[in-house]
Image: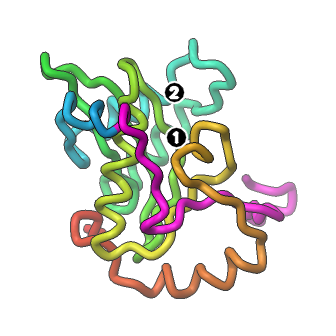
Amino acid sequence: MNLPDGHLGWWSPVERAIIPLGGLKISRSLRQSTRRYTISIDEDFQSVIEGCARPDRPGGWITDDFIDAYTELHRLGWAHSIEVWDSEGSLAGGLYGVTIGGLFAGESMYHESRDASKVALVHLMVVMNSGGVLVDVQWLTPHLESMGAIVIGRDEYLRRLPDALAAPGPPVFAAG
């Protein structure tokens, strides 16, 4: 956010939700759902961000300017999407976020079909276990908590952040 004095504002919340690597909880029904879908990475970033921005979603906050900015970040190799496809080849859901080194900062996720966003999160954690350090999911929701997300304080988050930023990160998310 641009402040009146022209400086760029940075949000540093008192608490932040993360999913610890190795801490993902996958229910039996979610494990079965993972078999129903096909996963891709960065094949249809535009459709994922637009799905997350649908105006009929409750609490929608993703504007056209936001989409333009994140599309440019994607073009530059910093923003990434995980797409979940159904058996007919239609996009069933997905998620997107920004990577810097071993940090994945999740922005939003959505689903058209049952469990599709959860399946995207499962795949994100698989990817992050191949070189990631920190998965930031912003805030704790019942949905994320059921999958293993926890809340840490600002001091702990800032303690972990330098190692995450310095890590090479998962090869699949290597910045262009």
Quarter of the image where one finds residue 161: bottom right
Q: Considering only vertical position in the picture, is 7 above or below 27? A: below
Q: Amino acid at mark 2?
A: Ala
**Residue in the image at 30% along x and 53% along y:** 75
Q: Considering only vertical position in the picture, is 173 above or below 63? A: below
Secondary structure under badge 2? loop
Q: Nearer the viewer, residue 67 or 14?
A: 14
**Residue in the image at 65% along x and 19% along y:** 58
Give the magenta-colored segment's residue range: 1-30
Instruction: Characterize the magenta stretch by its predominant secondary structure.
Output: loop
Q: Which residue is mark 1?
A: 108
Task: Kindly report the distance in space between the C-alpha atoms of the residues bearing marks 1 and 2.
Answer: 9 Å
Q: As drawn, is 147 to the left or to the right of 156?
A: left
Q: Nearer the viewer, residue 107 or 154?
A: 154
Q: Which residue is mark 2?
A: 53
Queried whether the magenta region covers residue 81, the answer comes back as no
Residue 9 can be seen, yes or no = no
Quarter of the image where one finds residue 43: top left
Q: Position of residue 126 (x, y in %)?
A: 30, 59
Q: Position of residue 7 (x, y in %)?
A: 77, 66
Q: Considering only vertical position in the picture, is 93 above or below 7? A: above
Q: Amino acid at mark 1?
A: Ser
